[in-house]
Each structure stands twice: as structure tokens, then as C-alpha cells.
Image (cartoon, rainbow, N blue to C red):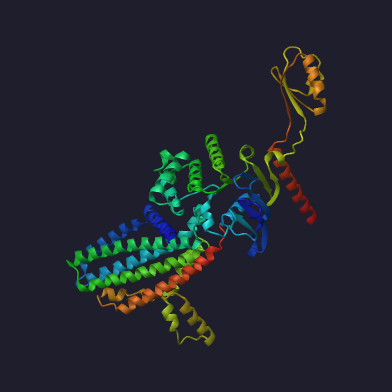
């Protein structure tokens, strides 16, 4: 046995699209992507629209073909069609045959996984229940809302109990309740030991669900790691929340505080924390909380996006 | 083969649910109209008129369905992105293509069979029974079906590498050119230099010769249709379809979806 294998291993994957007159120009939509998703982890693929998330996923699914590089899933080349029986895929904004009912479409997909009659019926019924489409199973998909189609898409992706599940923007088009259900399904998959790779631009989803995230901007991987690791762990200061009723006196601290009724909220450097707490105690304030200020994933993400834009502008300027 | 079957069955189901078979109503009305009309005006040629019109309608309706649905088989799935989830499953792209082809040919077979039944009913009504020569209509219908299958294969090939609009034009163009393939082979007496003449002849052998499937004259007049014509046309269609579908599969296997 060699090194432990990741569930998904991507090596130097690149994709260029020809465009313009006679397709002479090339647009790089993914550049030299190397990363891996470990067995059993939930991995979030983050990036703004057009960053290359869907391109990567489509490359893994063999819907498009790479200009360079390779990828392996479960130790097998993505060219291996049989391997695709062990993975599940939810396309972005999924669309299915609208002349079929939800039951029929799932039954149709189940056939490609070699499920036999009774097994198929049981699996499809259970799956419809799981994604909350049990009552709508006999309605043709042409009458479905976007959110309902998303659920059908999710159901077909996990119907055959795949080891690796790849979801392209699974939360898009869903109401808060639907998002919650998708989150629960992802957590269920994780609990069952399955590997999940999903793309999103909703950072709170990633923060809540992912063991690790990869941030892709402008076709390049800009950062990869646990959400906590990625953001600079060094606290950027302290935050105190306190109550102070009546006359506040002339506490210098209050100059920088935000007030809501009797409650105050103040941010200050860590070195000044104890002096501030002493002063508040002396003034008779009731301390409600003291916390470190950490950058959010959103701030980290915005930082990367802005850096990429600045770089692109710089290249453009030097190019002229 | 299980995957091919599954795709084929679903393609057939799509055609039925999208009311493709409604064209049969049009055909039925046409047959009823013709039967009433010839009953009133023609003397002795009722049979010829009905068979001729019936077979022409079966062929023309079939050609329209083959070209338009044939092109839509793959292009509609790419456009609506319904094949994304499917191709990520353990399905080879050629299996998908072959399934689509078989599904539409199944649809055409049912459609053509129903129209043929309509034609026989019209004949029976007008002639108060059927004659021995009427059996040859079946052979003519069978050859029409072979022709339709070949058109579907061509439509599928073109739709694999170009836009639906162009694919329709190309398929229709090859069909019309294919009707004259025989004439091109025997072209002479035209002022062309030998090189150009060779080229024209070369092209004529590449084009599908749709005249191979035309036995309408014999069927209309109740003449016999030799078995050789039938089996040769069958072999020709199978070979040509196999080559065209292989080409389509090669193109489609490397096609980047949007």
C-alpha cells in the first residue's frame, strides 16, 4: 500500500476555451488546478460566479474534457465509465425530462445503476420521501418549481448510495427551509462516511458544513484548508458587550462604543482589554461578553477576490 | 445493452407524451378524404390513387419526423441540459446515442405501422376487400421505414457537431442530393472536364442512394417486388447507418458540453 489515497485527486488540471474569429483566441477557464479531497470529508468549493468551480466539476464528470492534466476519483481515472457508478452528481440548475414525473425520472436514472425492479421501487420511494417530494411524485416535472427540481436533482445524485457525491451549487434556488434540508442531507452523507464535494458562493453554508474549503478565483486555486485555518487565526482585537444604565459618567471608552438602549458594544486592541474592564467595573457596568474578533470567511474570500482583480488590472496596465 | 434499451424506451415515451403520434390524426383524415373523393370521381383507378397517396403521405410525414426529431434527439438534450445528470452516470456516450436512435426508430415504426393499417382500411373500404397485389404495399412501407432510419442516423450525425438549424439543412440537403445519387453516377454528355466528372461520380457514391428504397411504382400498380431488392436495400441501409452512427459516436465522444 502506498500513500493513503484521496477520494478525489486532481493534478494540474487546465481547461481552455477557444473563442473569437475562427476560434483562434483561447480563454483559460481553469489553470493548473492541483488539489485533493480526502476520503469522508465535506469539501466546499468556493468562488465567485465564473471562477471555474463548475468547470472543475464538469471536468470531473467528463461532461467537458481537459486541455491538460488528469484527475482520479476513488483511485480510478475519471475516464473509467464504470467508476461513475460509485459517484453521484447534481448539475448546476438541474433540468430533467419535463414529460416525466419525479418518480419516473428517478426510476429512469436508477436503471443505469443496475438496480432491479423491487429494489428500484423501494429506493426511489425512500428517496422521494427524503427530499420531501413524496406528495408530488406523480406530477410531471414541467409543473415543478426551481426548488423542487433541485430536490429531484439531489435525489438522483444520491439514489444509488454513491461513495463520492459532487454537488454543483446545491443550495441555489432553495428557500431557507430547503437550504436547511440540503444541509441536513449533506451532514447525513458525511455521517455515512461518504465524501462530499460541493460548490457554492454562499459562504455561511461552507463555514457551517465543510471540513475544508478551496477558494478558486479567476480559474486559479487561491487557498485551501479548514475554514478556521484559512482565516488568519490571530485575533484582530477584542470585543466587549456590556450594559450600563443611567448616567454613564465620562468613560473615555464610550466614545468608540455603539449603543443600543442600555447596551454598549465596543472594539479595542487586546492590550487595552484589562484596563477597560477595570474602568467598566468601576462605573458599575454589567459585562455581558468578551470575545476575540476573527475575520470571517467572507472577509477572507473578499480579500482573495480583490487581490485577483488588482493583479488582473496590473497585468492589463503593464500589457499596454 | 441495458443502457441502450433504457434510453430507447425513454425516447419512445418522450415522443408519445409530446404528442408526436398526433400526426396520425392528420393521416387518418387524409385517407378518409381521399377514400370519399375517389369513390365519387374515379373509375377503375381508385386503388392506384389511394395506394399512391397513402404511401406518399407515409413517406413525407415520416421524413419530417425523422429530420426534425432526429436533429432534436441530441441537440434538445444539450440545449436543455437534460443529459448532464445522465452522462455522469455509468453510461457510455455511444450507448446514449444508440439508445436515442433506436428510440426514434421505434417511434417511427409504430407511426408507420399505424399509417399502413389506415391505408389498408381505406383500400378495403373502397374496394370492398383486399387483393393479392396489396401485400406488396407492406414491402414498400418496409423500405420507407429503412429510408427513415437512415435519415434519422444522418440527422443525429449532423446534430452532433453543428447547430440544430444547420443540422436540419444538412440532413434535408443530403436527402435531396441522395435522391439524385443514381443520376449523378450515370452523368454523361455534360461538358465537364474529366477531373470534375470523377469528383461528381465519387460524391455520388458517398451520398446515400435513397432511390434504393423507392418501390412505390411497383406497389401502386400491384406488381411484384423482387426479394433481392428488399434484402439488398436492407443490407445497404444497415451498413450505411452503422457507418453514420459510428461517425456520430466518434464526434460526440469528444464533444464538450456547454
Taking the spot 82% from the left edge, 20% from the top edge, the residue there is A252
* Residue A17 placement, left or right of B184: right
Check the image and report above or below for A36 versus B199.
Answer: above
Q: In the picture shown, does residue B230 fall above or below B119?
A: below
Q: Is residue B57 left or right of residue A289?
A: left
Q: Position of residue A176 (x, y in %)?
A: 55, 35
Residue at the extreme top of the image, as rendered: A246
Front residue of this view, candidates B5 and B164: B5
Q: In the image, what residue occupies the spot 49% across and 53% down?
A: B82
Percent across and percent down for residue B106 are 37, 62
Residue B67 location, x and y as percent?
43, 64
Quadrant (top left/top right/bottom left/bottom right) for the N terminus of chain A: bottom right
Residue closer to the observer: A261 or B254? B254
Answer yes or no: is residue A257 visible: yes
Which residue in the rendered view is the most extreme toward the left? Answer: B128
Q: Residue at x 52, y 87 (%)?
A: B194
Residue A139: give x, y in percent of width and height: 40, 43
Image quarter (top left, top right, bottom left or bottom right) of the C terminus of chain A = bottom right
Residue lying at 36% horizontally and 66% vertically, measured from the top left: B60
Q: How many marks?
A: 0
Q: Quadrant of residue A259?
A: top right
- Which of A80 and A204 lies nearest the eye of the viewer? A80
Examine the rendering and report whether any part of residue B88 can be seen.
no
In the displayed structure, B75 sits above or below A153; it is: below
Amino acid at each position: 500500500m502506498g500513500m493513503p489515497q484521496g477520494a478525489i485527486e486532481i493534478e494540474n488540471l487546465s481547461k481552455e476555451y477557444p473563442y473569437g474569429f475562427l476560434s483562434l483566441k483561447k480563454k483559460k477557464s481553469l489553470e493548473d488546478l492541483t488539489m485533493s479531497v480526502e476520503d469522508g470529508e465535506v469539501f466546499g468549493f468556493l468562488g465567485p460566479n465564473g471562477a471555474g468551480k463548475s468547470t472543475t466539476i464538469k471536468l470531473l464528470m467528463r461532461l467537458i474534457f481537459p486541455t491538460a492534466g488528469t484527475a482520479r476519483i476513488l483511485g480510478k481515472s475519471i475516464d473509467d465509465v464504470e467508476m461513475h457508478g460509485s459517484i453521484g452528481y447534481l448539475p448546476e440548475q438541474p433540468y430533467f425530462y419535463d414529460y416525466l414525473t419525479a418518480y419516473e425520472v428517478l426510476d429512469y436514472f436508477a436503471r443505469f445503476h443496475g438496480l432491479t425492479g423491487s429494489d428500484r421501487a423501494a429506493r426511489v420511494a425512500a428517496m422521494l420521501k427524503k427530499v420531501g417530494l413524496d406528495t408530488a411524485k406523480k406530477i410531471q416535472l414541467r409543473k415543478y418549481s426551481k426548488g423542487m427540481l433541485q430536490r429531484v436533482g439531489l435525489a438522483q445524485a444520491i439514489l444509488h448510495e454513491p461513495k463520492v457525491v459532487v454537488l454543483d451549487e446545491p443550495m441555489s434556488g432553495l428557500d431557507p427551509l430547503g437550504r436547511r434540508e440540503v444541509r441536513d442531507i449533506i451532514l447525513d452523507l458525511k455521517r455515512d462516511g461518504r465524501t462530499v464535494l460541493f460548490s457554492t458562493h454562499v459562504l455561511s453554508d461552507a463555514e457551517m458544513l465543510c471540513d475544508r474549503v478551496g477558494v478558486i478565483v479567476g480559474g486559479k486555486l487561491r487557498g485551501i484548508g479548514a475554514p478556521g485555518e484559512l482565516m488568519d487565526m490571530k485575533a484582530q482585537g477584542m470585543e466587549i458587550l456590556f450594559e450600563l444604565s443611567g448616567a454613564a459618567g465620562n468613560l473615555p471608552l464610550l466614545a468608540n462604543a455603539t449603543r443600543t438602549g442600555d447596551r454598549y458594544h465596543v472594539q479595542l486592541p487586546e492590550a487595552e482589554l484589562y484596563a477597560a474592564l477595570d474602568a467598566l467595573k468601576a462605573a458599575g457596568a454589567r459585562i455581558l461578553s468578551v470575545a476575540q474578533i476573527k475575520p470571517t470567511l467572507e472577509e477572507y474570500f473578499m480579500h482573495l477576490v480583490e487581490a485577483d482583480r488588482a493583479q488582473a488590472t496590473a497585468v492589463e496596465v503593464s500589457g499596454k | 445493452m441495458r443502457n441502450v434499451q433504457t434510453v430507447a424506451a425513454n425516447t419512445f415515451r418522450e415522443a408519445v407524451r409530446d404528442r408526436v403520434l398526433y400526426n396520425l390524426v392528420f393521416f387518418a383524415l387524409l385517407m378518409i378524404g381521399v377514400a370519399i373523393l375517389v369513390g365519387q370521381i374515379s373509375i377503375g383507378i381508385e386503388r392506384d390513387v389511394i395506394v399512391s397517396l397513402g404511401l406518399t403521405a407515409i413517406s413525407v410525414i415520416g421524413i419530417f419526423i425523422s429530420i426534425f426529431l432526429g436533429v432534436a434527439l441530441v441537440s434538445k438534450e444539450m440545449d436543455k441540459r437534460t443529459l448532464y445528470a445522465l452522462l455522469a452516470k455509468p453510461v457510455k456516450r455511444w450507448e446514449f446515442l444508440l439508445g436515442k436512435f433506436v428510440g426514434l426508430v421505434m417511434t417511427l415504426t409504430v407511426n408507420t405501422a399505424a399509417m399502413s393499417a389506415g391505408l389498408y382500411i381505406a383500400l378495403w373500404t373502397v374496394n370492398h376487400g383486399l387483393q393479392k397485389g396489396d401485400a406488396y404495399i407492406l414491402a414498400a412501407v418496409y423500405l420507407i421505414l429503412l429510408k427513415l432510419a437512415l435519415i434519422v442516423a444522418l440527422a443525429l450525425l449532423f446534430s452532433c457537431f453543428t447547430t440544430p438549424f444547420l443540422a436540419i439543412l444538412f440532413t434535408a440537403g443530403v436527402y435531396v442530393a441522395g435522391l439524385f445519387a443514381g443520376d449523378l453516377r450515370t452523368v454523361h454528355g455534360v461538358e465537364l472536364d474529366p477531373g470534375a466528372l470523377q469528383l461528381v461520380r465519387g460524391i455520388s457514391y458517398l451520398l446515400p442512394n435513397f432511390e434504393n428504397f423507392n418501390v412505390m411504382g411497383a406497389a401502386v400498380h400491384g406488381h411484384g417486388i423482387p426479394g433481392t431488392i428488399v434484402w439488398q436495400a436492407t443490407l445497404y441501409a444497415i451498413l450505411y447507418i452503422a457507418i453514420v452512427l459510428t461517425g456520430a459516436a466518434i464526434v460526440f465522444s469528444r464533444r464538450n458540453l456547454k
